[in-house]
Amino acid sequence: MNLSRMLAERTAEGRPVRVGLIGAGKFGSMILAQAKCIPGYHIVGIADLDPVKARGSLARVGWSEDRYAATSFGDAMDNGTTFLTQDAGALCEAEGIECIIEATGHPIAGLRHAMAAIDAGKHVVMVNVEADVLCGALLADRARQKGVVYSMAYGDQPAAICELVDWVHACGFELMAAGKGMNFAPAYRYSTPDTVWGYFGWSEEEVAAGDFNPKMYNSFTDGTKAAIEMAAVANATGLDCPSDGLAFPPSGLQDLAEVFKPVSAGGRLEKAGIVDIAASREPDGRMVLNNIQYGMFVTFKAPDEYTRACFQQYGLLTDKSGWYGSMWRPFHLIGLETSVSVLSAVLRGEATGSSTRYRADAVATSKGSFQAGEFFDGEGGYKVWAKAIPATQSVQKNALPIGLAHHVKLKRAIEKDQVVSFDDVEIVEDLDIVQMREDQKALLDG
């Protein structure tokens, strides 16, 4: 609770925190919107493959043109301005920048950017959860060896969940589960970019009037994004994924402690200590009362009768027994909060959540029956959804991670809901990432 004070002290000394941003899309735009409001927080450079789009993002969030008119990184640092470039590698290597924010959303590019930044001695805030769940444990290990911080992005749900998990442990409660809310019902699993807007209730006119990416929205709808984020949380906290993937039990705020406790105690969990999703819809599609669609939660158990009584005395929401309680955060503000991660890394040397273990995986799972010769189209597409499973299972199945399931060709037929194996597909590109996956197996936890 002293990051603003620490930043003010550095600013008074004439030493701003210098940051590089890769990706000026929606998340990046939100980062930039707040950066202009934080004295001493200097975005030295922005790398984006589309400079016109990057300039449009800056204008949209209120940056004046003179603020991003720098002609080089050195010019930007000398004058407190920002340099726009298409060269992410040059941004990662730029002398004087202390932290790189990776916000592209592209898993392969994200891994390469993070490796370059770490090798250049820079902290990394990984907005790109798709990249993190693919090889985050390896990146965290590499960062540790280089003496820099590899961190999740505060404001995104995984980092907020990690904060709640840390709170449970720091208070001495017994952690039962951690997760987030989500608009999900079983029928959503097989959504495609063609059908996704119906689940949001938007008309064709509303969609046409906005800047909506159907694959991105479909990734949220079919449960893929949930699998990616919950596997990342497991890798950061040591929690487990359910053995058969996320169950998405419907639950409102008042029922969290009743639902997210073990079956042996009358709940829905196969055991204590797992991640899952509180679905905001019943299986028939009806909205759950007091759902936490935009929130994050933890459930936990009192260690003794005295603490159980305190739960009741101070109004904690508990199950009927009073032994199990829940704590939650109702909202998250995405990139508007990411400066917390940057300042924590630079000023404290601490991550706001970090995937230091290889404990869980988000693996490609078929949306239908497909024949040899057909191509997968990756996250949010027509062919696959991601299933969050323990890493031990992923290794045993030689499972294909969702981050490598884009434009890969099937070598043999597969069935609906089948976890796809590396043996099922031809991998001819991104072989460096495949090798990173192999190297990560040495960090297998559990």
Image (cartoon, helix red, strand yellow):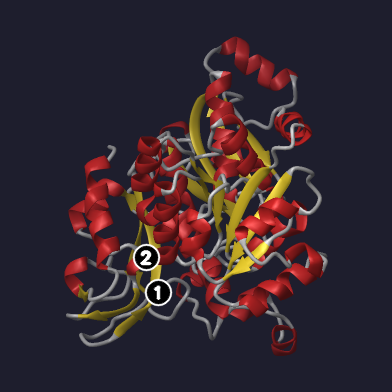
**The N terminus lies in quadrant:** top right
How crowded pointer 1 is (Cα within 10 Å; few <14, some 14-19, many 20+) is rated as many
- The relative height of residue 306 versus residue 159 in the rendered view (above or below) is above
Judging by the rendered image, the residue that carries numbered circle 1 is 378
Q: Label 2's element? A: helix
Determine which of the numbered discs, if any, sits on residue 402 in the image. 2
Label drawn at residue 327: none
Quarter-wise, where is residue 240 in the image? top left
Query: Which quadrant is home to the C terminus?
Result: top left
Q: Nearer the viewer, residue 227 or 375?
A: 375
Residue 432 vertical position relative to residue 295 in the rendered view, above or below: below
Mark 1: which amino acid? Gly
Whether residue 147 is visible, yes or no, is: yes
Identify the element where label 1 is drawn: loop
- Spatial CA span between label 1 and label 2: 7 Å
Of residues 389 and 258, which is closer to you in this image?
A: 389
Residue 363 sits above or below residue 278 on the image: below
Lateral position of residue 286 relative to residue 129, left or right: right
Left or right: 152 as drawn, with respect to 15: left
* Side of 341 relative to 58 (left or right): left
Q: Residue at x 78, y 46 (%)?
A: 38
Residue 299 image position (x, y, % from top left): 56, 34
